[in-house]
């Protein structure tokens, strides 16, 4: 398995170089890692402060790690925070995040890269968020006796860790000083492999969405667009999601306002989306307060507004679950919105919970979406029941950051 791991990493590195001229993400990853160690050495030259290293794969994991980063900064102001990303969808959006002192792509995993990276950064603590398991980095950190935490982790029986051939991957988990999981099932699964340094803390995203909801600022253009109407929010949509939504949009856009925030913002995609919707749609960047109320559909063509936009919602559809997997439901759930999404949601504990509670409705096609929506929309009191249940659930799940920080304080002050 180690040989396959090494071959896979080398193949990935080679594919990046081949794909870069044709793929924007590959190009950004390749460019972001150019002369990386030179940049790291320059950034850390003369640093006399202790450093804690947070690593996130992408933007979603960043939002899970952010509450812990900010709580850490408050508790340990003398420390500097090193934040790394694997993916450009995290780095490019948060490369100017003010809560971290250093922000870089993580060099690709290898024995030489891990040794050099850890020697430059010299972290006193490393925190990996959710799914990040890198053999050589974990090996080097453990060798140097640097505590390693995994936070908001979640495990399933079908993962390689729990297969007969998964010893190499299980050994990665054994290198963690402690693993903080989202649920009980994850702790029990780890125990079946002899991994006992794990406890349930919950998902730090609950803390994050509650923080965000408490500090939402109004968006004048959206205020003018919604004008007191019911609003159906579509967050992080892909073309497959829009195909399922299209009949409902056409049926209800004369009486309900729709706000659509695509997952990827590029001109061709926006143009196709506007063409699919037909009349009555306007781009956010081309709208003005005086006339926006005349439109029925508002298409968001920028990044960073989604969590605030959910505060305007009456209902929400969360994209991704007709493709690789569901995007963030909690940004909408914190406002108590009835949720709709596609069928690929089982890997997300909060989505499973919300479906069980009757607050979220998975659908497989346009007819199912219409039926699920109309049942709530036309039943007196149905939406309010969902809102009350959903808000209570989010409040009850909060507190993971406090649990993790209590242990970090003991680790660093012992």
Image: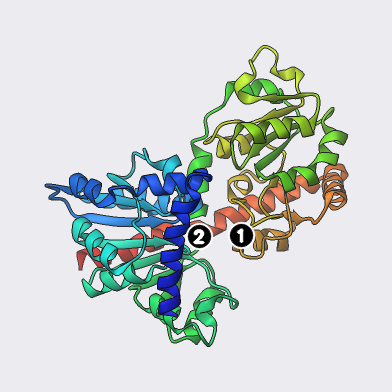
Left or right of 348? Residue 2 is left
- Pointer 2 with pointer 1, Cβ within 8 A: yes
Q: Give SS at disc 2.
A: loop
220 in relation to 74, above or below: above
The residue that disc 1 covers is 350
Is the residue marked by circle 2 packed among few (<14), some (14-19), or many (20+) residues within 10 Å? many
Looking at the image, which residue is at 69% across and 38% down?
233
User: Residue 179, relative to residue 271: is it above or below?
Assistant: below
Q: Is residue 122 visible?
A: yes
Say which quarter of the image contains residue 231.
top right
Residue at horizontal 54%, vertical 59%?
397
Q: Is residue 399 visible?
A: no
Q: Residue 401's quadrant in the figure?
A: bottom left
In front of the other: 251 or 373: 251
**Does 179 appear above or below 121?**
below
Locate residue 280, reporting x and y percent: 78, 24
Q: Quadrant of the C terminus?
A: bottom left
How many numbered markers are drawn?
A: 2
* Residue 371 falls left or right of residue 336: right
Residue 91 at x, y = what percent? 42, 45
Q: Which residue is mark 2?
A: 203
Whole-Å distance between the Cαs marked 2 and 1?
A: 9 Å
Color encoding of the figure: rainbow
Q: Position of residue 173 (x, y in %)?
A: 41, 76
Binning the other alpha carbons within 10 Å of mark 1 as few (below 14), some (14 to 19) or many (20 upward) gives many
- Residue at 12% across / 50% down in the picture? 48
Describe the element under mark 1 as helix, strand or loop. helix
Q: Quadrant of the N terminus?
A: bottom left
Camera-nearest residue between 400 and 31: 31
Residue 125, x across and y down, in percent: 27, 62
Which residue is pictured at 34% across the width and 49% down the height?
33
Residue 316 left/right relative to 109: right
């Amino acid at each position: 398995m180690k040989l396959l791991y090494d071959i896979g990493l080398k193949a990935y590195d080679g594919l990046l170089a081949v794909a870069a001229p044709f793929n924007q993400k590959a190009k950004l990853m390749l460019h972001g890692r150019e002369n990386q160690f030179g940049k790291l050495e320059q950034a850390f030259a003369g640093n006399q402060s202790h450093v804690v290293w947070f690593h996130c794969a992408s933007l979603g994991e960043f939002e899970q790690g952010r509450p812990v980063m900010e709580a850490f900064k408050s508790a340990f102001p003398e420390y500097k925070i090193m934040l790394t990303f694997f993916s450009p969808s995290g780095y490019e959006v948060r490369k100017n995040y003010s809560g971290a002192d250093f922000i870089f792509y993580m060099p690709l995993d290898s024995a030489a890269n891990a040794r050099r990276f850890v020697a430059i950064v010299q972290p006193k603590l490393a925190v990996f968020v959710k799914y990040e398991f890198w053999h050589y980095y974990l090996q080097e950190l453990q060798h140097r006796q640097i505590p390693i935490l995994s936070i908001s982790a979640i495990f399933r029986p079908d993962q390689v860790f729990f297969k007969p051939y998964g010893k190499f991957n299980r050994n990665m988990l054994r290198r963690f000083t402690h693993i903080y999981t989202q649920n009980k099932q994850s702790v029990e699964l780890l125990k079946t492999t002899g991994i006992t340094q794990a406890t349930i803390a919950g998902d730090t995203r609950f803390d994050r969405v509650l923080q965000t909801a408490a500090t939402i600022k109004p968006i004048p253009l959206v205020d003018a667009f919604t004008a007191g109407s019911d609003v159906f929010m579509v967050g992080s949509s892909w073309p497959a999601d829009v195909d399922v939504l299209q009949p409902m949009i056409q049926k209800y856009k004369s009486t309900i306002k729709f706000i659509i925030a695509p997952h990827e913002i590029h001109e061709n995609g926006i143009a196709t989306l506007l063409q699919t919707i037909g009349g009555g749609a306007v781009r956010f960047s081309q709208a003005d307060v005086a006339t926006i109320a005349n439109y029925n559909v508002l298409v968001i063509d920028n990044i960073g507004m989604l969590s605030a936009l959910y505060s305007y919602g009456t209902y929400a559809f969360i994209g991704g679950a007709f493709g690789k997997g569901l995007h963030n439901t909690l940004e909408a759930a914190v406002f108590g919105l009835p949720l709709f999404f596609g069928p690929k949601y089982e890997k997300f504990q909060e989505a499973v919970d919300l479906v069980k509670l009757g607050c979220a409705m998975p659908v497989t096609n346009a007819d199912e979406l219409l039926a699920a929506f109309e049942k709530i929309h036309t039943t007196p009191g149905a939406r309010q029941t969902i809102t009350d249940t959903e808000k209570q659930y989010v409040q009850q799940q909060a507190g993971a950051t406090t649990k993790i920080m209590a242990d970090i304080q003991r680790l660093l002050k012992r």
